[in-house]
Amino acid sequence: MLSGFGKACAVILFSGNCAFAQSNLIEPEAGTWKTWVITSGEDFRVPPPPDASAAAAELAQMRDLLAQKDPAAADKITFWDAGSPGYRWIDLVNNRLLENQQIPNAHRVYTYLTMAMYDATIAAWDAKYFYNRPRPSEADATLATALPPPRSPSYPSEHAAAAGAAATVLSYFFPEEASSFKAMADEAAQSRVLAGVQFPSDSSAGLELGRRVAEQVIARAKADGSEAVWTGTVPTGPCMWVGSKPANVTMPNWKPIVLAAPDEFRPPAPPDCQSPAVKAEMDAIRQFERKFPNSYKAFYWQSPSGLFTDWYDYASKWMFEDKTDTNPPRAARAYAMLATVYYDAYIASNDGKYAYWYLRPNMLDASITPLFTVPAHPSYPSNHSTLSTARCEVLAYLFPRHAEFIRAVGKEAGDSRVWAGIHYEMDNRAGAALGKAVAGKFIERAKTDGAD
């Protein structure tokens, strides 16, 4: 039987009049935050939730589910409740890279994945506070939930929206696994029903919303220029990079996300490779004493952990610590900023590389033996310095308590390329300046996106 409060709520389940007996609601204005790809959250608002009679039937179904106390269901609830709605999807990509699975242009996967989850979350938040549907346990106070109900309206499900968006984007990148990703999304959505914190219709609406948003994100991905085939030739001459298959050579023509153009912050031209300044930098590379601590770090920063996963792990860890993981819009914003700043910084760095085609240190002096295979693209500026600085500046903005630490991490990542003998110090300096400039535009955007 429904309690007196529950009966009243069942009648007006989506009117908002008895939606919250709680305070400190989670981001009531997040539905208005600036989105990355879709026009706005409001433009993707889901249809109204079911009427009172349908909601009552859903409650009866949920009471039966909760009474079963299924251990397998409990495991699913625990798994998907860890972190924010996007956490497990980020972790999925991280784990693939750590298992040495090849993900071409992995930064594109992170970028479109996180943008889709963020935009779907913002659209979900618009609908939540527009309809103000109570959580199931607010409609029926006797419902014993497996998790504390989040302090936000129930409809649509935030976990389902993120899951629908994530699974659809990942299916675009890995079409042979589409059915597996769909099953994961269905499980993520169902886990919130099994926990008693959302109605089945909340989850189905969230899944559909996430898929609709992802379709817009995929359309953007298809038009970003990444499929272009290079038909140029490698220039020759003094101080020029030597090779036949330059990596990332089409990237200067990719479509940035926030930058006005790939060359918006292009570094100044590097000095002549026979100049005293470059000779001094070459001497420093030759004389650098490579010992285990710095060599280990050079290899680490060349690994999937250094290139990708640890940056997201820092963000996840700090969100766990400050409870941002219980704030889905803000958590999704952090992941998306971290991924998108990398995307634009990578484009900007390669714009500089292919504007100058500057040779690597071991091409200037064959006696220099790098620690590992030199990446197949020009030297100036350093990708690592650009990308690491861009990411550390965004993380410093998002988590100011950790600013000093993460900036030291970013500097080490850049320095490691000189320790490995694959970059000049001038590459490092130019990359750090470029990364900071790119991050500055993203931080400027963030200050006006509605979240601050």
Image: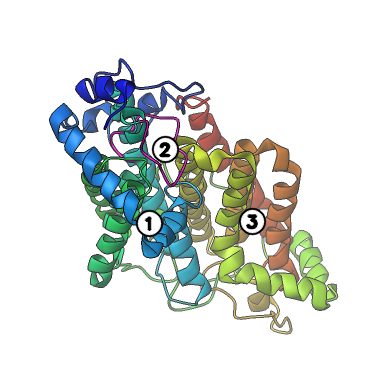
Q: Residue at x 48, y 60 (%)?
A: 91
Please report whichever mark, 2 or 3, sits nearer to the chain's N-terminal start: 2
CB of mark 1 within 8 Å of CB of mark 2?
A: no
Q: Position of residue 419 (x, y in %)?
A: 75, 70
Instruction: Provide the residue designation for mark 1.
Output: 69
Task: Identify residue type, mark 2.
Answer: Ala
Horizontal side of residue 304 vs 22, given as left or right: right
Between marks 1 and 2, how big is the CA–CA gap?
54 Å
The residue most toward the top is 17
Assign a secondary structure to mark 3.
helix
Task: Identify residue type, mark 1.
Answer: Lys
Q: Position of residue 122 (x, y in %)?
A: 36, 34
Assign a secondary structure to mark 2.
loop
- Is residue 86 shown to the viewer in this render? yes
Task: Identify residue type, mark 3.
Answer: Ser
Please report whichever mark, 3 or 1, sits nearer to the chain's N-terminal start: 1
Nearer to the camera, 4 or 305: 4
Instruction: Provide the residue designation for mark 3.
Output: 385
Between marks 3 and 1, how big is the CA–CA gap?
51 Å
Q: Which mark is residue 159?
A: none
Q: Main secondary structure of the magenta part?
A: loop
Between marks 2 and 3, how big is the CA–CA gap?
21 Å
- Is residue 422 shown to the viewer in this render? no
Q: Which mark is residue 260?
A: 2
Q: What is the quadrant of residue 275 in the picture?
A: bottom right
Closer to the eye: label 2 or 3: 3
Q: Position of residue 175 (x, y in %)?
A: 24, 68
Q: Does 301 appear above or below 48?
A: below
